[in-house]
Image (cartoon, helix red, strand yellow):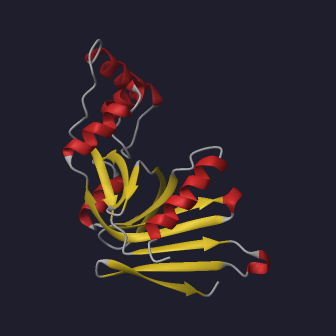
Amino acid sequence: MTDPFTLFDQWYGEARQSEINDSNAMALATADARGRPSVRMVLLKGHGPDGFVFYTNFEGRKAEELLANPHAALMFHWKSMRRQIRIEGPVDTVDDAAADAYFATRSRDSQLGAWASDQSRPLPSRDVFMARYADALSRFEGGPVPRPPHWSGFRVAPDRIEFWQDREHRLHERRLFERDGDGWREGLLYP
């Protein structure tokens, strides 16, 4: 098989059936302008041959790092399946239409939370955040909640995808796909 997206779809489909919580959770690694790494969990909200998409507040740390250094690594880990997938590549932003369409699918409370949060900034108390949430609730009462201008999505366009399958006695199987022009080159890695 020389199409990593077909294999991703197979593994992801199996994970959606077997993982109890957040089968779409992935670790996102970024680095700041000085090369200091940072990692956190985000949720996959779209994927295909053009990349892997997640959404966030563009005023938070992850977005600031990605806008300054548009490269990232992702990792899915499905413990019950004893599998992981690592993805590396350049990052770009999704267009406004895609961000608007996804934002419209979020629960109203999540939409309001996007207006209330200064993501990653110091918060004096939980009461301050809840007051801001109440203000957003009042502001948009009775109508739709538009996407905040500081909220959108990123797409990681993979140039490297590794599929790792746990095996007994640490004799794991590692399949590596690397971008090769318009296609992919496939190989194996020692465990």
Quarter the C terminus occupies: bottom right
Q: Position of residue 109 (x, y in %)?
A: 41, 25
Identify the residue at horizontal 59%, vertical 61% (top origin): 77
From the viewer's perspective, is residue 55 above or below residue 52?
above
Residue 128 x/y as whole percent = 39, 27
Q: Residue furthest front?
A: 1
Left or right for 106, reference 6: left
Name, please, the residue furthest toward the right.
169
Instruction: Compare residues 66 and 1 and report the one nearer the observer.
Output: 1
Residue 103 occupies which quadrant of the picture?
A: top left
| Left or right: where 101 falls relative to 105 | left
Residue at image coords 33%, 39%: 102
Residue closer to the observer: 67 or 18: 18
Q: Quadrant of residue 119?
A: top left
Give percent across and percent down for residue 66: 30, 61
Residue ranking furthest to the top = 142
In the image shown, does 17 or 65 lie closer to the viewer?
17
- Write the residue at 33% across / 66% down: 157
Classify 182 as above or below 121: below
Q: Quadrant of residue 170?
A: bottom right
